[in-house]
Amino acid sequence: MSDHSIPAAEPGAGAGTEEGESGQGGASGTGASLEGASGESASQSASSKRATPGKGRVSNRRQPQGHASKARASTAGSSETAASPESPSSANGPERDGPEKDGPEGDGPEGDGPEAGNSQGDGPEAGTPETDSSQASGSQPGGLQADSSQTGGPKTNAPKAGSPQAGGSQTDGPTASGPKTSGSKASTPQTSRPTTSGPKADTPQTSRPTKSGPKTGTPQTSRPTKSGPKTGTPHTAAPETTASPTNGISRRTLLGTAGATGLVLGAAGGAVGYAAAPAGATPLSSVGSTEAMFHVKHQPGITQGLQARGHLVAFDLAAGAGRKEAAALLRRWSRTAELLMAGEAVGAHDTDVARDAGPSALTVTFGFGHSFFARTGLEKQRPVALDPLPDFSSDHLDKSRSNGDLWVQIGADDALVAFHALRAIQKDAGSAAKVRWQMNGFNRTPGATAHPMTARNLMGQLDGTRNPKPAESDFDERIFVPASVTKDPSWMANGSYAVVRRIRMLLDDWEKLTLGAQEAVIGRRKANGAALSGGTETTAMDLEKTDAQGDLAVPINAHARITRPDQNGGAAILRRPFSYHDGIDADGVPDAGLLFVCWQADPLRGFVPLQRKLDRGDALSQYIRHESSGLFAVPGGAAEGGYVGQGLLEG
């Protein structure tokens, strides 16, 4: 909640937005500041892109019996030009097969455990009548489904007028789709199924953005289609074929980049890497389709918006492992991260945990701890800024959950995608390194609010009002190590330093305070984040304003006052935390709080002076406890074809 810092922007989509927006927010950080700057991550556009809806993962495993006929029908319906040119078929148009009979499917909801206000998958999902819950875009957490027109987050479950389920907006029930039976359904209104062509005459269509332009008189939601209009003539089904599950094509390609109903083969001359998407597969929601780039100037996971799920994990090199083994490990990790962030499998031994999902804004970030350099014989390359942090009065640190030779930060907007990456990174470590500690966190799910806004922390405060913004002229100077004229070694160019703290919030004590007392501790209104001196959330705090009794409107020990950069010689950090909840003890006390992660060009000019100031009189300090700590040097992004830390390990 610091006025100089706070979490990077939470991606969120306001209702009705077409392109989505990057929202603000994050969970509250304590100690080193829970107050900060909301704001969109302007640099996100430079290091991430919105993948075309329709990307997804499907497995090279054999389909379960309940889906086998759909997989065959899918390839048949999707191979209109290659498999059966004389019998053009459309997965969306009226077929000679007659009405579909919907039946319950065996796919259950995805769940990621109890989380305060941020469950990623605790409710059943509803697909369109012709999709099943195993399809890439049909599975979104907690019943919050996204229309493919939105890039910032999922939509809620309200169908649009004139459409049984407009634009893929999903209801709360389980997905239903059953086998097709023969007959005719030429006049059946179409639900939101991706098509390989344009509208059919006189047929109500849900809105799909097309590559050939809008369709006249047809309400459009946001499903991409491939080609021109259909004439309304029923099509016969193409002959059934089966997909060949061999390796070689990315998973995200298989559900199509424009809502295609299957994978067209033959013309490309390539083998199918995974089973083709079932007929009627809907495109990914905006949550699943978001893709961050791996080969960028600054490593991913620093300036991107807050993600819904996160894992922090530290490793120690195994006994006998040195520079050579560390280089091989970073090479493996970098390759794995690149594949996973693109929504692809990581080889023949992929666990398929994320097989149905797109990239989901996945980022993987790597850093080096102080002890790494002695273990690899690289002490001369250790930056001065990586010297251990000083002790602080609020510290109650568990050494076994602090520091480490190597540090990995994983974030994604889907719980399974995040876990899949965590498991892959752990397996890649092999015999070279072992896990020292690991922590799990969460943030608000993108699209959970009606419009983009600053997120709330577990104390209920808006948290992220004054984080530095990439658009500010001195942002890079404060957050990243410059490429030249620096005291840091050259391998740290364009890198940053991450301070990681597990900060427990003493919620039972906090929640006993009155609303007014809580606001006085923070210095801002709980409802809207406005400073107690007046105005709105973004109104500058008036530090001199007094009330009718002559008392300062913003108390002298308020957290937001103490952490302001102008009260700390300009010291500022970029906060990008995750909330955490690790259960409830036998006395009913929750172990919950903040996985505080902050970024700066130099901790001695960022986190350290701020924490020292907080140590001397922050009103919030009696409601929090710092339980673990770490400082890591995070080098710049990997060059194309290279790996993270290559300049250090091979320089």
Image (cartoon, grey):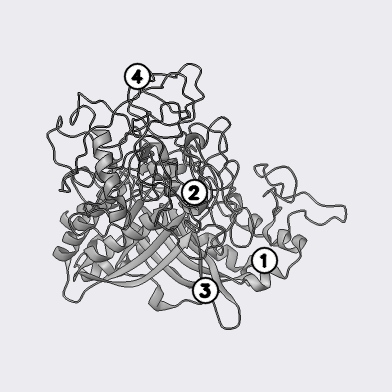
Indicate the quadrant containing the N terminus: top left, top right, bottom left or bottom right.
bottom right
Question: Which numbered disc covers residue 228?
Answer: 4
Q: In the figure, is residue 406 to the left or right of 574? A: left
Q: Please tell me how crowded label 3 is: few (under 14), some (14-19), or many (20+) other residues with Cα within 10 Å.
A: few
**Foreground: disc 4 or disc 1:** 4
First in residue order: circle 4 vs circle 1? 4
Circle 3 — which element?
strand
Front residue of 292 and 17: 17
* Horizontal arrangement in the rendering, residue 512 relative to residue 416 (left or right): right
Which numbered tag is attached to residue 8? 2
Residue on which disc 3 sits: 583
Q: Could you say which is closer to the camera, residue 601 or residue 301?
A: 301
Circle 2 sits in a helix, a strand or a loop, which is it?
loop
Q: Circle 2: is it few (<14), some (14-19), or many (20+) Cα within 10 Å?
A: many
Mark 1 residue type: Ala
* Tag 2: amino acid: Ala
Q: Position of residue 108 (x, y in %)?
A: 42, 58
Q: Residue at x 46, y 23 (%)?
A: 203
Mark 4 secondary-structure assignment: loop
As drawn, 402 above or below 159: below
Q: Which mark is residue 619?
A: 1
Q: Label 4 neighbourhood size at 10 Å, few (<14), some (14-19), many (20+)?
A: some
Residue 34 is drawn in which quadrant? bottom right
In the picture, residue 81 is in which quadrant?
top left
Work out whether mark 3 precedes mark 4 in sequence or the reverse, and give the earlier one: 4
Q: Nearer the viewer, residue 511 or 125?
A: 125
Q: Which amino acid, by three-letter code, is at mark 3?
A: Gly
